[in-house]
Image (cartoon, rainbow, N blue to C red):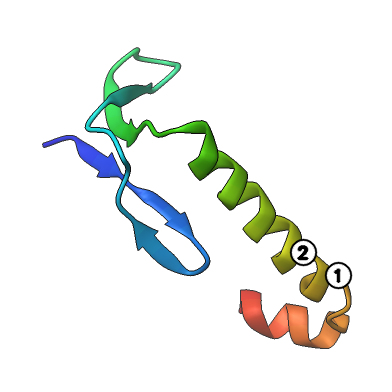
Amino acid sequence: MTQIIEHFIDGKRVQAASDSRCNVLNPATKEVIAEIMMDEVSASAKAVESSRCAFLGWSETPVGEKIFVFK
């Protein structure tokens, strides 16, 4: 069964406005390994803004705390 990858914005799964999907291929075998949900430009803008806001906080986080997140 092919994995369907949904949008994940602001720490939450977000339902796409469309049922349209795009295949994700393994570059070595050309096998379809997943499908990603396609969406409106407005959803992309929301994701970019969310990422920008998250980065601002992350960039001010001390290295010791960042290391803890990745352990």
**Disc 1 vs disc 2: Cβ atoms closer than 8 Å?**
yes
Label 1 sits on what residue type? Ser
> In the picture shown, does residue 23 fall above or below 60?
above
Q: What element carries label 2?
A: helix
**Residue drawn at point x = 43 percent, y = 16 percent:** 28
Q: Name the residue under label 2.
A: 55
Describe residue 29's horizontal placement relative to residue 3 as left or right.
right
The x and y percentages for residue 55 are 77, 64
Residue 58, above or below 65: above
5 vs 69, left or right, is left
Q: Which residue ends up furthest to the left in the rendered image? A: 1
Disc 2 crowd, CA 10 A, few/some/many (<14, 14-19, 20+): few
What residue sits 30% from the left and 51% below the top? 15
Q: Along the line of sight, which residue is nearer the eye, 60 or 70?
A: 60
Which of 32 and 43 lies nearest the eye of the viewer? 43
Q: Residue at x 63, y 74 (%)?
A: 70
Instruction: Name, please, the residue furthest toward the top.
Output: 30
Dot 1: element: helix
| On-image quarter of the N terminus | top left
Residue 10 versus residue 22: which sits nearer the camera?
A: 10
Expressed as whole percent of the image width and height from the top left, the position of residue 18 reads 27, 33
Residue 23 shown left or right of residue 1 in the figure: right
Q: Measure the C-alpha gap from mark 1 to mark 2.
A: 6 Å
The quadrant of the picture occupied by the C terminus is bottom right
Residue appearing at x 79%, y 75% in the figure = 57
Q: Mark 1 points at which residue?
A: 59
